[in-house]
Amino acid sequence: MDLTNKIAIVTGSGQGIGRSTALALAEHGADVSSCGYEFGGCGRRCKED
C-alpha cells in the first residue's frame, strides 16, 4: 500500500494501538499527525521511532 503524499491524523498515538497505527502509516509513506492525551508521549514516540 503506497500512502505517499497522503496525510493521516491519528488520535491516541502516544501508546498502544494508536502508536502502532501511526507507525504503520508512516512506514507506508504517509505524513502522520499525532495527537493524544499527553503530547509529550506522542512527540517522544516520533523521535524514537
Image (spheres, rainbow, N blue to C red):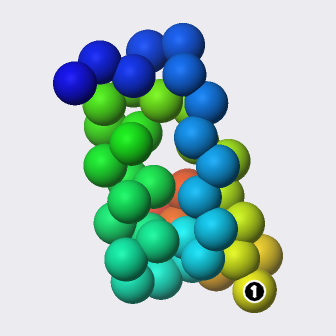
Q: Looking at this view, name the residue that lies furthest to the top.
A: 5
Q: Mark 1 points at which residue?
A: 37
Q: Residue at x 66, y 58 (%)?
A: 34
Quick check: 35 above or below 26? below
Q: Can residue 42 be seen?
A: no
Quick check: 34 above or below 26? below
Q: Can residue 21 be seen?
A: yes
Q: Residue at x 45, y 55 (%)?
A: 22
Q: Where is residue 25 in the image (x, y as percent from the top left)?
A: 39, 42
| Other-residue count near label 1 (Cα within 10 Å), few / some / many at <14 / 14–19 / ≥20 | few
Q: Position of residue 45 (x, y in %)?
A: 52, 67
Residue nearer the viewer, 45 or 22: 22
The quarter of the rendered structure image containing the C terminus is bottom left
Q: Element at badge 1?
A: loop
Residue nearer the viewer, 1 or 40: 1
Quadrant for residue 4, please give it.
Answer: top left
